[in-house]
Image (cartoon, grey):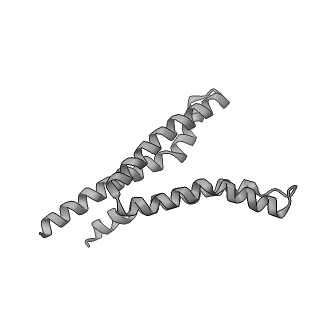
Amino acid sequence: MAKASKILYWTPRLIYITTVAFISLFALDAFDSSFSTWHQIRNFIMHMIPSFTLLVFLIYVWRKELTGGSILIIIGLALSVLVFRHNFRMNQSVIKSLIPVLLLTLPFCITGILFIIDFFHRKKQRNILH
């Protein structure tokens, strides 16, 4: 595999994993000294459900780049609308509402596009070899 092919192969996967790690950081707010240890652990696990779901989806996307990338783009666009509307209701500012959209949902769209590009690039490489 050429260097460009390796970069194209690993970039969407690393962006996806980094995005899931970033989202997982939000689960740390489950730890509060006013609750018991078991209550904190239960809350942490509940907060980690989205991250666990995204990691399971990574297994699918890793093998099915075209459909997985398409689903990631749809997820990113749908979440963009939801995140923007939620933040706009809270602060009535377009700029302040766009920042969470860029941080939380744009990586899914970019990753989906890169998975699709990788799919077609690898398909083209297989056709050249045959």
Image quadrant containing the C terminus: bottom left
Q: Please identify the quarter of the rendering in which residue 3 is found.
A: bottom left
Which residue occupies 73% across, 54% down?
29
Name the residue at 25% across, 71% down: 2
**Which residue is farthest right?**
34
x and y percentages locating residue 74 in the rendered image: 42, 43
In the rendered image, the quadrant that contains the N terminus is bottom left
Pick the front one: 91 or 43: 43
Q: Nearer the viewer, residue 98 or 33?
A: 33
Residue occupying image coordinates x 59% and y 53%: 50
The mark tally for this picture is 0
Residue 38: x and y, percent? 81, 63
Foreground residue, 99 or 109? 109
Query: Residue 34, percent across and down?
Result: 88, 55
Residue depicted at 45% across the width and 39% down the height: 77
Q: Is 34 situated left or right of 119 in this image?
A: right
Quarter holding residue 43: bottom right
Query: Would residue 126 appear left or right of 90 to someone viewing this image?
Result: left
Residue 123 vs 101, above or below: the answer is: below
11 lies above or below 68: below
- In the image, residue 84 lies at what x, y percent? 55, 34
Q: Is residue 28 left or right of residue 15?
A: right
Name the outermost residue toward the top: 92
